Amino acid sequence: MNGDPKLYELLKKLDIDFEYIEHPEAPTIKIAKQFWAGHDAKHCKNLFFRNHKGNQHYLVLLDCDQNMDIHSIEKILKQGKLSFASPERLMRYLGVTPGSVTPFGLINDKDHHVIVFIDSTLKNAERLSFHPCINTASLMIKKEDLLKFLDYCTNPYYWIDLY
């Protein structure tokens, strides 16, 4: 299976079942959507930001069909001026490259530095879809299992209303 072997070990340890889809590289939602056809999971867009000082990082999870601009997210999160984190920061905090951003990357955030914000519309989803730390596969898990995973990682996470 494509993805971080440590992730699959952890999912097994946490008793988190998943559906696995292997596909060609899918660094954008537009590309990935063609591989998700016929699956009942709510597919997520995952955005990784840093604050103006560069001393805090945020992972924002939202419905892949939502269009959000960074200024709207700044106003909602109330964390000051944000910018997309660099590829180096993505690797340092999540262990992923651009186009592979995923909450599963939190297994690499040993200091629990990243704060996670989840759009409240995802509360209505039964299953959610994310890359397994690489964009050549997707995993579909129950929403409750995402929360179990986040609780295990101990990064702070908050439900927010992006709309």
Image (cartoon, rainbow, N blue to C red):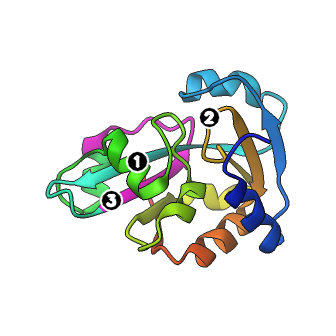
Q: Is residue 68 magenta?
A: yes
Q: Earlier in the sequence, mark 1 or mark 3?
A: 3
For mark 1, give the secondary structure: helix
Residue at numbered disc 3: 57
Picture quadrant where residue 160 is located: bottom left
x, y percentage for residue 49? 33, 50
In the figure, 24 relative to 128: above or below? Answer: above
Counting labels gives: 3
For mark 3, give the secondary structure: strand
Residue at numbered disc 2: 135
In the figure, 125 relative to 71: above or below? Answer: below
Picture quadrant where residue 7 is located: bottom right
Residue numbers of the magenta segment: 57-71
Residue 90 is tagged as 1
Picture quadrant where residue 126 is located: bottom right
Instruction: Give the residue at x 79% y 73%.
Output: 13
Instruction: Give the residue at x 31% y 57%.
Output: 76
Q: CA distance from mark 2 to mark 1?
A: 14 Å
Q: Amino acid at mark 1?
A: Leu
x, y percentage for residue 38? 84, 30
Instruction: Give the residue at x 14% y 58%.
Output: 53
Q: Amino acid at mark 3?
A: His
For mark 2, give the secondary structure: loop
Toward the front, the furthest residue is 5
Q: Specify whether 15 is left or right of 89.
A: right
Q: Earlier in the sequence, mark 2 or mark 1?
A: 1
Mark 2 Cα shell of 10 Å, populated few (<14), some (14-19), many (≥20): many
Q: Specify whether 11 is left or right of 124.
A: right
